[in-house]
Image (cartoon, rainbow, N blue to C red):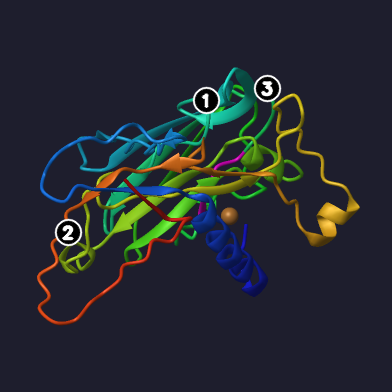
């Protein structure tokens, strides 16, 4: 998928929607006592980092396997899905600038697919665009040297005519590129703890709990809106964080306000 202005605007709107949908629970415990019960919703899943095999030439080999599965998004309802190395979404690929990598993609689907590295600067033969079909049961290698500044990218299928549906059903993952500067910026970088990946997906579940991706003309004109927001594949996710507060002001009186959508105080 290419990025243009309207897509960027759409992404911004989507992000705001997700901020509204994402419930972030802050447990405020003034003087150290513990009493937090599990909040409603689902713990935020963190896509695992895909560990590469390190080859004798120093290059890194990542393995992805696309397959069908099922996932219980809603209690007691199994939704048919697609995923890389699992039933839904895929692991996070992480590579440093200058590293030679190969991403080996096995297609265990019953249909053709491709694997495209959205935003990556690479030779055309590694791009995984619509012209680079991976037939059912086939395997394809994308080999290239990472040569771009630090970035957060994503990967997804890009096969002609089935890109949207395959992504919709779960084939997507994050691709993080590090460079010589990104580690020295003073930004939180403990993946999954203070460096949190969020894959935001608006999805439409039908009455049987299936995605049933079936866009009609209004959907094609205005967008395929969903009825459920997923974050990392979870409905109504939460991430517990603990904030310790201490008021040490002398004269000024401050009132802290919670956003009812973002922070729930206990
Ligand atoms: Cu894309």
Q: Position of residue 56 (x, y in %)?
A: 20, 35
Quadrant in which residue 266 is drawn: top left
Q: Position of residue 139 (x, y in %)?
A: 52, 29
Does residue 76 appear left or right of residue 265 in this picture?
A: right
Q: What's drawn in magenta, residue-wise?
A: 114-118
Residue at coordinates 75% horizontally, 51% vertically from top-left?
224
Does residue 220 appear left or right of residue 46 in this picture?
A: right
Q: Which residue is mark 1?
A: 87
Which of the two discs, 2 and 1, labels the residue nearer the N terminus? 1
Which of the two discs, 1 and 3, labels the residue nearer the N terminus? 1
Q: Residues within 10 Å of mark 2 (few under 14, many from 20)?
A: few
Q: Position of residue 147 (x, y in %)?
A: 34, 62
Q: Position of residue 162 (x, y in %)?
A: 73, 41
Which marked residue is nearer to the observer: mark 1 or mark 3?
1
Quadrant in which residue 40 is drawn: top left
Q: Quadrant of the N terminus?
A: bottom right
Q: Report the label total.
A: 3
Q: CA distance from mark 2 to mark 3?
A: 54 Å
Q: CA distance from mark 2 to mark 1?
A: 40 Å
Q: Is mark 1 within 8 Å of ligand 1?
A: no
Q: Which residue is mark 3?
A: 110
Which of the two discs, 2 and 3, labels the residue nearer the N terminus? 3
Q: Secondary structure at mark 3?
A: loop
Residue at coordinates 75% horizontally, 24% vertically from top-left?
208
Q: Which residue is mark 2?
A: 245
Ligand 1 quarter of the rendering: bottom right
Residue at coordinates 82% horizontally, 45% vertically from top-left?
215
């Amino acid at each position: 998928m290419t990025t243009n202005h309207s897509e960027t605007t759409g992404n911004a709107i989507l992000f705001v929607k997700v901020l509204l949908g994402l419930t972030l629970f802050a447990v405020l415990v003034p003087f150290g006592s513990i009493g937090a019960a599990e909040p409603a919703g689902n713990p935020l899943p963190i896509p695992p980092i895909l560990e590469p095999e390190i080859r004798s030439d120093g290059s890194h080999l990542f393995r992805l396997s696309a397959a069908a599965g099922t996932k219980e998004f809603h209690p007691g309802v199994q939704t048919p899905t697609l995923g890389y190395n699992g039933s839904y979404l895929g692991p996070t690929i992480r590579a440093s600038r200058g590293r030679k990598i190969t991403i080996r993609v096995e297609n265990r689907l019953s249909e053709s697919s491709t694997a495209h590295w959205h935003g990556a600067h690479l030779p055309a033969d590694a791009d995984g665009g619509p012209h680079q079909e991976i037939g059912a049961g086939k395997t394809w290698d994308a080999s290239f040297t990472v040569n771009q500044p630090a970035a957060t990218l994503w990967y997804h299928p890009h096969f002609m005519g089935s890109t949207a549906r395959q992504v919709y059903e779960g084939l997507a993952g994050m691709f993080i590129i590090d460079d010589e500067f990104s580690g020295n910026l003073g930004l939180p970088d403990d993946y999954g703890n203070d460096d949190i990946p969020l894959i935001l997906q608006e999805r439409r579940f039908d009455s049987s709990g299936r995605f049933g991706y079936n866009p009609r003309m209004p959907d094609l004109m205005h967008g395929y809106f969903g009825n459920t927001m997923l974050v990392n594949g979870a409905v109504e996710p939460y991430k517990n964080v603990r904030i310790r507060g201490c008021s040490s002001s002398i004269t000024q009186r401050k009132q802290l306000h919670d956003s009812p959508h973002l922070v729930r105080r206990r």
